[in-house]
Amino acid sequence: MPFYRPNEDDLRPDDDFDPADVPRAIAAVGIDMFTKGVEIPIHEHRKAQLILTLRGVVRCEADQSVWIVPPRCAVWIPGNLPHSVTAAGNVEVYLLFVEPDAAPALPSQCCTLSISPLLERLLLHVAQMPVLYDVDGADGRVATVLLDQLSLAPVEKLNFPMPVDAKLRKIAIAMMADPADRATIDEWGRRMAVAPRTLTRALKRETGMSFGRWRQQLHILIALQRLAQGASVQTVALDLGYEGASAFVTMFRKALGKPPARYLAERRIAA
């Protein structure tokens, strides 16, 4: 499958490539594009899908969560699960489609998978293989190894829960658009003309999180993405509404067990 470079308004492979019709355990495509912003509305595939982003900003909404994926991670979407995808910037993304019964050990729910260097290289290789690769040849063996490695990939909790409640959903969208907004739940209650206690109960019921923990999860995902793109800790801290780098680093360490620089360095070494 040759690397695909679509127009700005198209994030799909060409019309000759429909992964649902490929009679193989896996089918993959790499997409390289620059876009000011493109969205693929809610849709679903019979096959499961893995979305690996190597460059740019790709966001997926599925299973009542937004998945903003940092480096060395990918979103796993089981078959027949409705999802939408948005992308912006200089994007390099790889899409892998997997027959539902080809890897039964893979998660049955949407999640983030940690991608090892070997798995990444296998995926990049598979994206260059013929669509109808020789199942009994070298390409078929590569496909088998890829599925084995994918089944072993660690699951990471890197999602931002999107509530069904309309007012909470508006808050979520507003926080994603302006992550520096430090409004409290009381302030959001006034903005939405809803009692803060009502919002708090609904949020806890739907996500299991307090408002502070919910917003913190969004900040962690945005921070990981921006830091990986080369932004400084100070810049990210200010962009997220912190008074300075120290407060941001403290939050990050409490959430992930280590400061940002060490967290990212260890991921690069692991890569």
Image (cartoon, grey):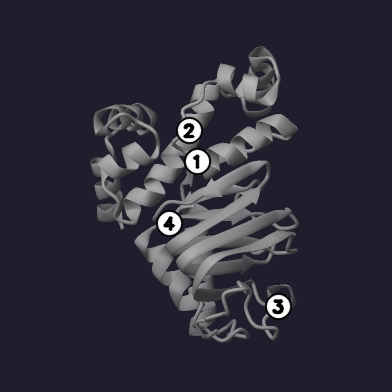
Q: Where is residue 155 in the image (x, y as percent from the top left)?
A: 50, 45
Numbered circle sitting on residue 181: 2
Q: How far apart are marks 2 and 4 (CA)?
A: 32 Å
Q: Which amino acid does label 4 sit on?
A: Ile
Say which of 229 and 206 sits in front. Answer: 229
- Mark 3 and mark 4 residues within 8 Å of each other at the beta carbon: no
- Image point (64%, 62%), residue name: 39
Circles 1, 2 touching at the beta carbon (< 8 Å): yes
Residue topped by disc 3: 18
- Locate residue 16, reporting x and y percent: 69, 86
Q: Answer whether labels 2 and 3 touch (C-beta < 8 Å).
A: no
At label 2, the amino acid type is Asp
Q: In this view, does 8 lie to the left or right of 83?
A: left
Quadrant housing residue 55? bottom left
Mark 2 / mark 4, whichever is N-terminal: 4
Distance (Cα) linking label 1 and label 2: 6 Å
| Residue underneath mark 4 | 115
Which residue is label 1 attached to? 178
In primary-sequence order, the first of circles 3 and 4 is: 3
Earlier in the chain: of badge 3 and badge 1, it is 3
Question: In the rendered view, would you say 59 is above or below 36?
Answer: above
